[in-house]
Image: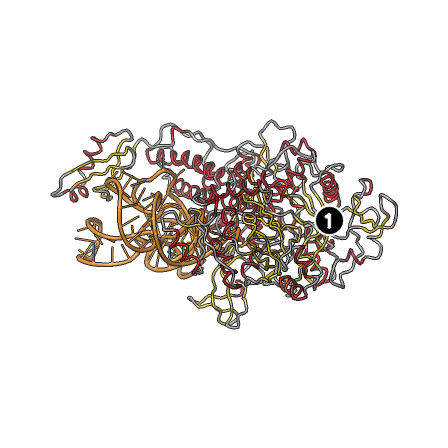
Amino acid sequence: MATPEERHNLRRTEAKWQDVWTNRNVFTVEENSSKPKYYVLEMFPYPSGRLHMGHVRNYTLGDVVARYKKAKGFNILHPMGWDAFGLPAENAALERGVHPGKWTRENIKVMREQFRPLGLSLDWSREIASCEPEYYKHEQKMFLDFLKAGLAYRKESWVNWDPVEHTVLANEQVIDGKGWRSGADVEQRKLSQWFLKITAFAEDLLKAIETLDRWPDKVRVMQHNWIGRSEGARVYWPLVNADGRDRGETLEVFTTRPDTLFGASFCAISAQHPLAAKLAETNPALTEFIAECGRTGTSTAAIEMAEKKGFDTGLRARHPFDPARTVPVFAANFVLMEYGAGAIFGCPGHDERDMEFARKYGLGVHCVVAPAREDAAAFCAKLEAGNEAFTDDGVIVNSDFLNGLDVDQAIRAAIAKLESLKLGKGTVQYRLRDWGVSRQRYWGCPIPVIHCAKCGPVPVPDRDLPVTLPEDVTFDKPGNPLERHPTWKHVKCPSCAGDAVRETDTFDTFIESSWYFARFCSPHATDKPFDKAEAMKWLPVDQYIGGVEHAVLHLLYSRFYTRAMSACGYLDMQEPFAGMFTQGMVCHETYRTADGLWVEPGAVQMDGDKATANGVPVTIGRSEKMSKSKKNTVDPQHIIETFGADAARLFMLSDSPPERDLEWTDAGIEGAWRYLNRLWRMAVQASAIPAQDVPSDLDPKVASVLRQIHRTIASVGDDLEKFRFNSAVARIRELTNGVGDIDRALTGGDAVFRFGVGILAQLINPLTPHIAEEVWELLGNTTILAQGGWPTHNPAFLEDDVVTLAVQVSGKLRDTITVPKAADQTACMEIAMASPGVQRQLEGKTVRKVIFVPGKILNIVAS
RNA sequence: GGCCGCGUGGUGGAAUUGGUAGACACAGCAGACUUAAAAUCUGCAUCUGGGUAACUGGAGUGCCGGUUCGAGUCCGGCCGCGGCCA
C-alpha cells in the first residue's frame, strides 16, 4: 500500500504554511486596529505531558471560529497558556522523585512542540503559565484585596479528610466513604480554612444566567440547580429538657414548607450541629453515633444513598403555633450542617424522607394537606395508615388558622404568623456554599498570610509579595512538604515582629483558571494582574469553548471571580464569557482479552468480524471516552505525522456535530485524507487554466454550478456562525462534487471550474487551513488566506429560475415536476395532471381539494 | 421521584419555520483502468411485494394514539438511553 507521504507531501506543505504564518505574524493581535474585536478562547490545558485527541478537538473547534472570524474582518485575540498547578505534578514527584516544577515545565515544553504541527492560529506571544510567580503573584495581591473587601474570610468547617494522603478531599473525591486514591475511610474533620464569599453574589449569579443567551441551555440549567435558590422560613423551636423544663434556648430550623408545620412530628439536627456536640459531652452513645455519621461522606449523594439513621437526644422542641405540643429532637445522618440551619423539622405526611424516618422510629404521621377534590377525612386516614407521603399541592387541613388555604397561601400565612410571634421569619436559602480554597498541597499558589499567635492571621505586606514556593522540598513522606520544610514557614509577624508562621496551605487550582482570560488581555503586565482598559476592551470572551465537565465549577467560579474583581476595581463588568460552547468527548472502541485486560487499538488485528491481539482473541467493547486506563487512546502526533493536521481536523469536524461525542475511526481519517488529495488534484487542473473573469454567457449546466457556488458561500457562512461544522463540510463536499463534474468543454466551463476551486479554498480555509493556502497559491494568488478575506455571495444567484415541485396525491408523493419559479397553481396543475404517475392515482377518483405552496408542493386531494 | 435532552439505514449523521426522509460521508457490493495491487474513476445501495427488465405497488424516522391536505418535526400516553437535581 502506498503510504500517504508518497502521494502528496502534506507534511511538507503543512510545515511550509506554518512557517509562513509564523514569519508574517498573522496571528498576533493588531494593535490600534479599527476592526471590531473578537476574543476566541478554549479552556487552557493542564500540562500532563502529552496532547490527546480531546485537546485536538477542542483547539480545532476554536481555531475554526478564530480563522472564520478573522476572514470576516475581525481583530482576533486567540491566546494559549497552561493551567500548570495541580496534583498530578506532585504525584509524579512522589512516584519518580522529580520536582513538580521541573516536571511541569518540561511537559509544557513538550506540549508546546506538539501544538506546532496542528497549525492553530494562536498568538503565542501571549503565552502564560499559571505556576510561575509572574502569574500567581497577582493572584496573591487580589486575594488580599478580596480579604479587605470582605469577600474572603477564614472559618472552621467540616471537611473530608483523607488520613493516608493527609489532605482535604472535595466531595466529588469521596467514593462510598473512602478516598478515591488511597481507599482509606474518609474522616470528617473540623479545620480552619480560607473561603471566598461566592454566596454574596448568589442572587446575581442566578439572575444573570438569563442574560447568557449564547450559552447552552444544559449548562444554564446546571448552574441554576447548583445555586439552588429556595424560598422558605427559619423557624425557632423553644427547647425543652427531658425533665420537661425549658432550656431557655431555641433550635433554628430551615424549611421550604412552613405550611406543613402542624404536621410536624419530630425535629432533626445534623450530627455536626453544635447542639449535638454539646449533648454528646455527657452522652457516650451520642458521641459514638456522631462518629459513625462522620464516617460517611458529606456529599449529598452519599447521604441520600446511606440508610437514614437517627439518635433520640432526649430533648424536645415546643411547637411554635401550639406551645402545649412538643416533639422529640433527633440527631440524624441525613441532615446537612452546611445547608440552612443544619436542622429541620420532620413532617412525615408530606415528605418522603421524613416518612421513612418516622416509620423507622415509630413517630406519628399527621396529614395536613389533602387533594382539593377528595374527601379530606378519608384521604387523611389512608395517608396516616400508609407509607406514602403526599407531596403535591392541595388544600391545608387539620391546621388551625391555615385550614382551607392552598399551599402557597398557607406558606405566606404561616410566615406572617411566625414573624408576629417572633418565632421565625421568611427567608431565601441557597444550596450554593462558600468556596473553600485551602488545599494542603505543595504545587499550588501559596496563600499570602502569616499566622501570629498574638495578632492572628496577618496579610503579607505588598512589599513582600510574591510569596514564592521554596524549591528545596521533599516528597518522601505523605502530606504537605511546605509544612515540614525546615525554614520556609518561620517568619516574623509583619504586624508585631514576633515569631510567626506562614500559611502552608495553597490555593485550590480553580483560582488560577478563574481569571486567566483577563490576564491574556495584557499578559506581560508586571505591576498589576492586567491592564483594566485592555481587559475592558477585549472582555467578555466572545466565544469560549471547552468540555461540559466544567459546566458548573470552573464556569461558576469564573463568573464569581469577575464580579469579585469588579467589586475591587480591577474590572467593571459582570460576565466573563458572552458565548459558551461545550464540545463532546472523543471516543473509541475498547478491546479486552478473556482475562479482562484492556488492549490498545494498535495491537488489534481484524479478521472478518473476529478480533485478535498477538494471537489472543479479544472482545470488542462499546465505544467510550478515550482514556489511558482503558487503553483506547489514539495518539494525535502519530495521526498527524501520517495524514497531516488538515485530515485530522477535517475528520473531527465532519464526522459528528461538535457538541456530540465523536467516534474515532481509522477509516474516517482516511476518507478525509482522500478528499484533501482530490481537492488538491482539482487545484492542479485549475491552475492550468488561465486566470479570467466568469463570462456572463454560460451554458445552462455551467450556470447551475455557478448558482451552487453562490448558494454554498451563503450556507457555509451560516453553518460556521452556528457551530454546524459537520454541515459546512457536507456543503463544501457537495460543491466539490458539483465543480468537479463540470464539463469544461461547455461554454464558460473552464472559467467556472477555476472560480469554483478558488471559492472552495476560501470556504475550507477555516477548517483545513494548510491545503487551503496551497490551493490558493496554486491558483496564482499572492495574498494568504490566513490574513483574511471571505467570499461574498451574490443574492441574485441564490435561487434558480425554475424550481422542482413535489406533486402529491392525497398527501403521498407521486411525482416531481420542474416549473418556472413564478408558476401559479393553474399552471402547475396543468403540468401535474399530465403526469402518468398522477393520472394513475387519480383514476376513478374525484379531486376534492388542491393545496398549493409555491415552490414547494402541490397536493391533490382526491377520493 | 422531579426537571431537561435524545431515539432516523450496516455506521456517523442531514432534513433551519409541519411540505420530495436518508443530504454529505464511512463501511459494503459490482464494474472500468492495471500484468497485479494500491490509488483513481463509474455505478448500486432503508426494508419488502410483483416484473427478465425499464418499471410499479406497499411499509418505514423507538412503541401506541391524535391534530392536519400533509408529521422525523406539533399534541397525549408508553418504552429505552443520557444528563442535572433529589
- Up-down: is A562 above or below A671? above
- Up-down: is B11 above or below A617? above
Colour scheme used in the picture? secondary structure
Q: Nearer the viewer, residue B32 or A695?
A: A695
Q: Nearer the viewer, residue A376 or A359?
A: A376
- Residue A155 place in picture, x, y as percent: 71, 49
- Residue A859 place in picture, x, y as percent: 23, 38
- Residue A624 place in picture, x, y as percent: 51, 59
Residue drawn 84% across the image and 44% down it = A494
Residue beneath disc 1: A445
- Residue A285 place in picture, x, y as percent: 65, 66
Q: Amino acid at mark 1?
A: Cys
Question: Crowdedness of circle 1 by 10 Å Cα count: few (<14), some, many (20+)?
Answer: many
Q: Nearer the viewer, residue A793 or A362?
A: A362
Q: Nearer the viewer, residue A373 or A7?
A: A373
Number of numbered labels in the structure image: 1
User: In the rendered image, which quarter is residue A387 located in?
Assistant: bottom left
Would residue A71 be found to the left or right of residue A244 on screen? Answer: left
Would residue A650 be found to the left or right of residue A461 on screen? Answer: left
- Up-down: is A110 above or below A312? above
Residue projecting furthest to the left? A844
Residue drawn 67% across the image and 43% down it = A127
- Up-down: is A783 above or below A115? above
Q: Is residue A773 visible?
A: no
- Secondary element at image label 1: loop
Q: Chain of mark 1?
A: A
Q: Is residue A675 visible?
A: yes
Residue drawn 69% across the image and 39% down it = A523
Quarter holding the C terminus of chain A is: top left
